[in-house]
C-alpha cells in the first residue's frame, strides 16, 4: 500500500514550519497538522517575544531562502556583556573574537512565524498540505506505514504516512501517544518577557546579567528598543506581573543599572514557566522528535529554538539523502543517523545552560568568588571565548549542508 503522505509533521510552530520549509522542494508529500488556528497571516500562538538567533541559524535561514524576508527586523548582536550583579566578574564576547560578522541576531518571534508560514504556503509548494486547526489524536504503527488519527474540520480523519515527525512542543502529545517518557526538571522559575525604550543607543550589545533574583537579559532590537528576558522565582513572577509599568521600570533600572540610560515605555509583560526537559529516545521506527518535543532548555543563553533549527537541518539532510538512495525514510536504521548526529549538541547545550543556572543561582560565598574569577579568566582567554562562541553559534561539530550554504 502507498501511504497518503511521506511525512506528517505534527505541530506547525517555528520548528515544524521550518522543517516543512526545508523540504518544500523535495517532492516528498508532506502534511502539517497544527492545532492553533491562523489569525490573519500569523499563528495566534506566536507572540512578540524577542528571539536570539545564533549565527549558524541565520546561515540555515539563508539557505532556506527565508533570510531576505526577515533581515530588516533582525538586529545584529556585535558584542555580549556577561556579568554577576554587584560582584567583580565580567566577560565580554565580540563577533570579532570569533571572526564572525555578528554573534547572532535578535528578532521578534512573530516575524519569523509569519514569514515561515508565508513561504511554506506559497502556491508552488503543492506537495505541502497545511491542516489547521487540526490536532493529532492517536498514532498506530503498521507494517510499512504509520496511521495518524486527527481531528480536522469537525471530523476524525485517518492519515497514513511513512514518517511521523513530532514537532508539537514541550508537552508533546505524540510523545505521550507512543509512550516515550520525558524527564522534566522544573526550575520553579518563570521568565518575564517584555521590551523597553532605552535613552542611550544599545550599540548592538546584548547584556546577560546574573542577579540575585535570576538572570536578566537585555537584547538589542532593530527598533532601537531592547527586549527584556528576566528569570525569577514563580512567586516573584506573579508579583512582577501585578506591578504597574512605573514600578516595573523602577525595579528593572535598579537591577540593571544605567548602562543603557533610563528605561521607559514598557510593553506588555508575559510570564513563561521554565523547565529542563530531556527525552531519552529521539527516534523510533517511523517516528522522529524535533524542537521542544525533543528537548527544552532554560532561555538563559537563548538556545532553545536554535537547537530545534539544527534538528531540522540534520533531519532534512538525512531524509533527503535517504530519498535519493531510494531508502525508506521512516526506517529506524535511517532515523538513528539523525539521533546520533544530534545527541552531542543537545547534551552539551542542555548541560551548559543548566550549569549556568545552577552556578549563578548559588550565593555560597566561595562559589560566587570562584565563578567571578572564572568570568574574568574567560575575559582574558581569547581561545576559550572563540570556542564558546563557535559552540553557541551552532558552528561546531559536523555541520549540516544547510549551515554550509549548500542545497539539500
Ligand atoms: C522566555 C523564553 C525565551 C526564549 N528565548 C529564546 C531565544 O532567544 N532563542 C532561542 O533559540 N530560543 C528561545 N526560546 C525557546 C524557543 O521559544 C522554543 O525552543 C521554540 O519556540 C520551540 O519551538 P517548537 O516549534 O519546537 O515548539 P512550539 O513553539 O511549542 O510549537 C509546537 C506547535 O505544536 C502545536 N501542537 C501541540 N500539540 C498539537 C497536537 N496534538 N496536534 C497538532 N498540533 C499540536 C502547537 O499549537 C504549536 O504551534 C525561549 C523560550 C522562552 C520560554
Image: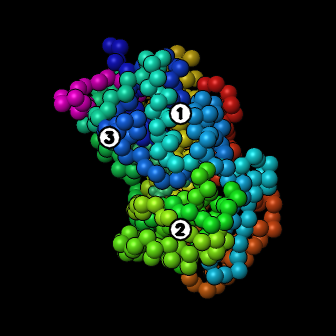
Q: Is residue 154 shown left or right of residue 187?
A: left
The secondary element bearing badge 2 is classed as strand
Q: Determine whether, in the image, residue 154 is placed left or right of residue 25.
A: left
Q: Is residue 358 magenta?
A: no
Q: Which residue is mark 1?
A: 315
| The quadrant where residue 187 appears | bottom left
When asked about the image quadrant of residue 156, the answer is: top left
Instruction: Give the residue displayed 54% in from the left and 41% down from the top.
Output: 309
Disc 2 from disc 1: Cα separation:
44 Å
Task: Tell me if residue 237 comes above or below residue 322 in the rendering.
Answer: below
In the image, which is nearer the foreground, mark 3 or mark 2?
A: 2
Residue 231 visible in the displayed image: yes
Is the residue at mark 1 in contact range of ligand 1, meaning its CB lies under 8 Å from it? no
Q: Which residue is mark 3?
A: 36
Counting residues from the N terminus, which is met first, the one under dot 2 or under dot 1? 2
The mark lying in front, picked from 3 and 1, is: 3
Give the image location of residue 268, x and y in percent.
Answer: 42, 60
Q: Residues within 10 Å of mark 3 (few under 14, many from 20)?
A: some
What is the CA distance from the residue labelled 3 to the residue labelled 2?
34 Å
Instruction: Determine whether the beta carbon of the residue marked 3 sits less than 8 angstroms from the nearest atom of ligand 1.
Output: yes
x and y, in percent, of residue 343 in the image: 56, 46
Outermost top residue: 1
Q: Residue at x 51, y 25 (%)?
A: 23
Give the CA separation, mark 3 to mark 1: 24 Å
The residue tagged 2 is 264
Numbered range of the magenta stretch: 149-163
Q: Which residue is depicted at the point 62% across and 76% down?
A: 257
Amino acid at each position: 500500500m502507498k501511504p497518503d503522505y511521506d511525512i506528517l509533521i505534527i505541530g506547525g510552530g517555528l520548528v515544524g514550519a521550518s522543517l516543512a520549509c526545508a523540504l518544500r522542494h523535495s517532492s516528498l508529500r508532506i502534511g502539517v497538522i497544527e492545532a492553533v488556528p491562523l489569525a490573519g497571516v500569523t499563528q495566534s500562538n506566536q507572540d512578540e517575544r524577542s528571539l536570539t538567533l545564533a549565527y549558524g541559524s541565520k546561515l540555515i535561514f539563508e539557505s532556506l531562502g527565508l533570510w531576505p524576508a526577515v533581515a530588516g527586523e533582525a538586529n545584529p548582536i556585535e558584542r555580549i556583556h556577561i556579568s554577576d550583579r554587584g560582584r567583580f566578574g565580567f566577560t565580554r564576547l565580540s563577533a570579532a573574537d570569533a571572526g564572525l560578522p555578528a554573534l547572532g541576531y535578535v528578532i521578534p518571534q512573530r516575524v519569523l512565524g509569519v514569514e515561515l508560514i508565508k513561504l511554506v504556503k506559497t502556491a508552488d509548494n503543492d506537495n505541502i498540505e497545511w491542516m489547521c486547526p487540526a490536532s493529532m489524536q492517536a498514532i498506530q504503527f503498521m507494517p510499512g506505514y504509520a496511521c495518524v488519527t486527527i481531528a480536522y474540520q469537525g471530523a476524525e480523519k485517518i492519515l497514513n504516512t511513512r514518517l511521523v515527525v513530532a514537532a508539537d512542543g514541550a508537552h508533546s502529545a505524540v510523545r505521550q501517544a507512543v509512550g516515550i517518557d520525558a524527564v522534566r526538571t522544573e526550575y520553579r522559575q518563570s521568565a518575564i518577557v517584555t521590551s523597553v525604550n532605552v535613552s542611550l543607543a544599545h550599540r548592538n550589545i546584548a547584556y546577560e546579567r546574573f542577579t540575585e533574583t535570576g538572570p536578566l537579559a537585555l537584547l538589542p532590537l532593530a527598533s532601537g528598543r531592547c527586549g527584556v528576558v528576566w528569570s525569577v522565582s514563580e512567586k516573584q513572577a506573579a508579583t512582577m506581573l501585578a506591578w504597574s509599568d512605573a514600578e516595573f521600570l523602577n525595579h528593572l533600572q535598579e537591577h540593571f543599572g544605567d548602562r543603557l540610560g533610563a528605561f521607559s515605555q514598557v510593553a506588555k509583560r508575559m510570564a513563561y514557566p521554565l523547565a529542563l526537559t530531556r527525552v531519552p529516545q529521539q527516534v523510533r521506527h517511523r517516528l522522529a522528535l524535533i524542537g521542544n518535543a525533543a528537548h527544552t532548555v532554560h532561555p538563559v543563553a537563548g538556545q532553545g529554538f536554535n537547537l530545534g533549527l539544527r534538528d531540522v537541518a540534520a533531519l532534512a539532510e538525512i531524509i533527503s539523502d535517504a530519498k535519493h538512495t531510494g531508502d525508506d525514510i521512516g526506517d529506524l536504521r535511517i532515523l538513528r543517523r539523525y539521533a546520533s548526529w544530534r545527541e552531542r549538541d543537545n547534551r552539551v547545550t542542555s548541560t551548559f545552560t543548566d550549569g549556568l543556572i545552577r552556578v549563578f543561582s548559588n550565593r555560597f560565598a566561595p562559589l560566587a568568588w570562584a565563578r567571578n574569577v572564572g568570568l574574568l579568566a574567560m575575559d582574558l582567554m581569547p581561545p576559550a571565548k572563540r570556542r564558546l562562541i563557535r559552540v553557541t553559534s551552532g558552528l561546531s561539530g559536523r555541520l549540516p549542508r544547510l549551515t554550509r550554504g549548500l542545497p539539500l
